Image: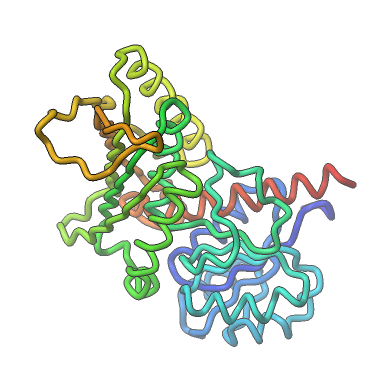
Amino acid sequence: MTDKRTKVAIIGSGNIGTDLMIKVLNHSNNLEMGAMVGIDPASDGLARAAHLGVPITAEGVEGLVKLPNFDEIEIVFDATSAKAHVVNNDRLAPLGKRLIDLTPAAIGPYVVPAVNGDDHLDAPNVNMVTCGGQATIPMVAAVSRVVPVAYAEIVASIASKSAGPGTRANIDEFTETTSAAIVSVGGAKRGKAIIILNPAEPPLMMRDTVFCLVDAPDPATHDEIRQSVEKMVGDVSAYVPGYRLKQQVQITEIPADQPVETLLVDGNRPTHQVSIFLEVEGAGHYLPAYAGNLDIMTSAGLQIAERIAQKKEAAR
């Protein structure tokens, strides 16, 4: 460890918070664990943190504020729930802490590292959208960089076993936050998000499907779309190694007699549907490989914290 590392705290000692802690401890060059915060004294996350020498508290955000090293902590990850994040932000923001929100609370700007990862590094609170958003919004953005996207719909299918209490309690927030970010970050005119909790045994890996309606009659544009998507897959897999295309990008013509209610910005009817099929395999740092939905969230959050720390160091 060096004094140049930025100290971070994690609120939420469940699966996401614990996986994030392991990533910080074992895979970060710029961050240092300052605290693991929970509300269940018997949680595995707090036990692991204590064993690894990380300061812990089971008294939630108030316990964090009381820790002797609280003043040294600069960044706080929140891996709790949307409702809890509102309370945590209200408590910590006045104390000058930077918050990286891994819930769908959406208090701060939406951030997807591969798309707008450098745009909000000075914001006091950034929102990592959702697992489905982190997986699919880069694909919508890749298409919209080539041609306007009239409508984008994403379907995120995750293993039921990888959906903890926080995820299940935030299904409505998941769809609302992801749909909004498809527009504001992905660049689509309209967006819709659907999540499926798949109870299959053995558990299946995260699968995501992205549909975009575009006006792209020129075959050369189709090649540009495919190239843009493939480049974006590479950008995301740089920090989420298990992120990959499941099959080739499909671009199909919309039949003239097929009803399409969505119009492009200039009023034209979309001519083609772009279909992108993804798979996200977890890194297995703490969570099973099938829990790619959780791994992509912790990896994205870690990536933004690293960039914040690097920017701070560069400014010295």
Q: What's the residue at 43%, 56% (across, down)?
A: 180
170 or 281, which is in the foreground?
170
Is residue 84 placed above or below 278 in the rendered structure?
Answer: below
Is residue 225 placed above or below 70 in the rendered structure?
Answer: above
263 or 138, which is in the foreground?
263
151 or 186, which is in the foreground?
151
Q: What's the residue at 49%, 73% (across, down)?
A: 80
Residue 175: image quadrant is bottom left
Outermost residue toward the left?
A: 257
> Left or right: 143 with respect to 184?
left
Residue 159: image quadrant is bottom left
Asked whether residue 278 appears in the rendered view, the answer is no
Q: What's the residue at 19%, 25% (across, down)?
A: 253
Residue 312: x, y in percent?
80, 50
> Left or right: 2 with respect to 23?
right
Residue 200: image quadrant is bottom left
Total label count?
Answer: 0
Asked whether residue 233 appears in the rendered view, the answer is yes
Outermost residue toward the top?
A: 220
Residue 220: x, y in percent?
35, 12
Outermost residue toward the right?
A: 316
